[in-house]
Image (cartoon, rainbow, N blue to C red):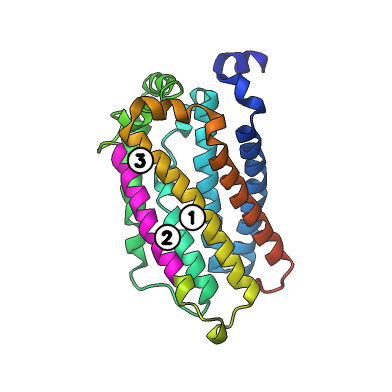
Amino acid sequence: MRDFITKFWIRQEAWNSWGMSFALLGFSMSVIAIIGLVYLTIRRKDRRFLLIALVATASFWHAFIYALIFNGFIRAVPEFYNKGIPLYYLIAPCAYFFVLFSLFPRIKWPRHMWLHLLPVVFGLIDAIPYALASIEEKRALLEQVVYDMQVGVRHPYGYIDQKWHYIVKFFMAFIYLIAQWRLLYLHDMELSPISVASRRNAEYFSIIYSGQLLLQGGMVLSLLSNSTQTSFLMQDLDQLTTISFFYLMLSCWLLQYLFRNLMVKNGT
């Protein structure tokens, strides 16, 4: 085990930082929440649990892969890298539909739901070149990525320039977020069958998700525009304490949402 850590672990001095503490606590809470939400999805057949479980899973994988890259451990599991691209495209639409069905539980699925899944297919196809690369090529790429995260944007393992994933994902998420807040604005408690607590729960989720998205969006835009400064920033965990904190806040919300619904017979 010691040889494994010595071989792959970099930036060991960051282990005691606040950013790492927030991230590890968030990981632990998210795992519990995901398992519980999957259980509720299967047992109660409620689409809200399915949607928020997908948001939780995609967010966890995104944070987990970044942590592996930051610590250098991604080099030990090169097959993990790039596998989350399709999953990340699910976060924004799932967050939107979760709020929609939480506020308006009687609304049916939209007729053209499959259109929201097109970016997922796009991401899945573009992940193929890396999946088909040899293990030696993957390790060589990741040896560069762990020391310069700009390589994650510049590498050739895809059918399109990798920066477009960041651009499309951010602007798509921004549009969904505006629509999500519009739902909250249009919702009228006097005409709604849901409780005030359910309304507030949707608001708290939207606030936390918005903060996390805006912070990540700022990082992405910086990543695409300033290679040297941003590469340093993304490798300094203390500079990412705020993002780690918002991930922890999301994990706390997920856990309270799980416990709240476990204690309610029909999951209101």
Mark on residue 41? none
Q: Which residue is drawn at 53% across and 32% down?
A: 239
When asked about the image quadrant of residue 9, the answer is top right
Identified by mark 2, the residue type is Leu
Residue 177 has which mark? 2
- Vertical comparison of 85 with 67: above or below: below
The answer to the question of whether label 2 and label 1 lie on touching residues, with beta carbons closer than 8 A, is: yes
Residue 97, compared with residue 248, is above or below; it is below
* Mark 2 → mark 1, Cα distance in angstroms: 7 Å
Instruction: Say whether disc 1 or disc 3 marks the residue closer to the N-terminus.
Output: 1
Tell me whether the residue at label 3 lies in contact with that at label 2, contact meaning CB atoms closer than 8 angstroms.
no
Residue ID at (35%, 61%): 116
Look at the numbered disc 3 and give the secondary structure of its residue: helix
Would residue 110 appear left or right of 268 to someone viewing this image? left
Residue bounds of the magenta highlight: 163-182
Number of other residues with Cα within 10 Å of mark 3, as a class: few under 14, some 14 to 19, many 20 or more: some
To which residue does mark 3 refer?
221
**Which is more N-terminal, label 2 or label 3?**
2
N-terminal label among 2 and 1: 2
Q: What residue type is labelled 1?
A: Ser
Neighbor class of circle 1 (other Cα within 10 Å; few <14, some 14-19, many 20+) is some
Residue shown at 63% from the left, 56% from the top:
253
Estimate the x, y position of residue 240 in percent, counting from the top left: 53, 35
